[in-house]
Amino acid sequence: MRNEYPLTLNDLSYSIAEVILGERIKIMTNHFEIGLYTFAELTPDPRTGDLISPAQRLQQFIERVELADQVGLDVIGLGEHHRPDFVSSAPEVILAAAAARTRSIRLSSAVTVLSSDDPVRVFQRFAALDLISDGRAEIMAGRGSFIESFPLFGYDLQDYNELFVEKLELLLKIRANERVTWSGQHRPPLDDRGVYPRPLQEELPIWIAVGGTPQSAVRAGTLGLPLAVAIIGGMPEQFGPLVALYREAAAGAGHDPAKLPVSINSHGFIADDSQQARDYAYPYFEQVMNKIGRERGFPPMTRDHYDASCELRGANFIGTPDDVIEKILFQHEIFGHQRFLLMMGIGTMPHDKVMHAIELLGTKIAPAVRREIALRMK
């Protein structure tokens, strides 16, 4: 099924004006969700050179989730990575620990690299998390932005797309059926096999995470699955056609777009002063983004590029609560989305700074954004 949807963003027929000014889809929800996601980085502090232990990093994560729950944030997402600079190769285990220390916050992967995993085990692990958390588990499935898991688990990168399509098909079949009969090319067949445990939620939420690929957005819409769009570069308007394409694909497949939520996931950092926020976060962003850039052949991020990304039409949410409120509402005019997840800093930022930023997100930003969006949706 390679090149199943051979499209690029340039092929789309939507202009930015049509996306922003066209008829708005009002999703059937009374609550705009705001939350966090992280990859649980383990990198030296660029200011001091200090490197905390993996145990410390995971303890910090649990404390941050506890605070996020206490200040009323809706979701925490934890990414799956298999590199020495991350400690989250098993997100479900870590999220289960967070479940025991929280009451309301939803617990999601961000993302589960489904292409290199077994859908049966993915479902079982998240079903167990759902039971432990009293029905708060979610799966955010994606192909992954890093490739280490493919050779680690014996998969060929040439099968990158086919693996995801086939395994997503099986995961959805398991979700819908307690006993499964299925066959494919990349996993042994199942002949009327039961998959247990079953989750507490009647239908375990499965989101599709995309980074800008139209084919992936079309697939999510065709299947009637919620869409999570990662915007970590460029201008948000560039992604408006992607969301419009997703909703058109959903409608074309017989799904009601008004029942399919969209999440925008971006990087950011919040402080009491705009310039203070930018200056403090810059070394951490520069360290991580330039390391990834060197691996992938991208040009280095300069301070000018970074500052531009912090402006209203940039990708990063870095500034005061008022700055972030304005930017979320600006993007809501473009996407009409129902969820916003913020990766609170990148790199191993000092714990106290991140905790203060989480408090600001929950106590200052979330209530203001929810009030305004509720008014818009009337």
Image (cartoon, rainbow, N blue to C red):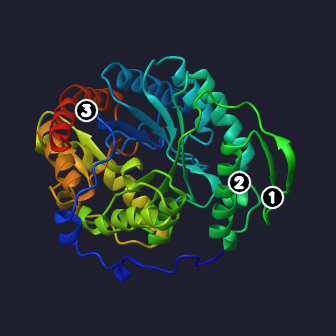
Residue at x 71% of width, y 61% of height: 151
In the image: residue 32, left or right of residue 230: left
Residue 307's tag is none
Asked if residue 265 can be seen in this view, the reply is: yes
Question: Considering depth in this image, is 303 or 313 the residue closer to the camera?
Answer: 313
- For label 1, the SS is loop
Question: Considering depth in this image, is 11 or 61 the residue closer to the camera?
Answer: 11
* Whether residue 342 is situated above or below residue 157 in the rendered picture: above
Quadrant containing the N terminus in the rendered view: bottom right
Asked whether the residues under the numbered discs 1 and 3 touch, taking CB atoms below 8 Å apart as contact, a structural biologist would say no
In the image: residue 32, left or right of residue 263: left
Residue 187's tag is 1
Quadrant containing the C terminus in the rendered view: top left
**Alpha carbon distance from label 2 to label 1:** 10 Å
- For label 2, the SS is helix
**Alpha carbon distance from label 1 to label 3:** 43 Å
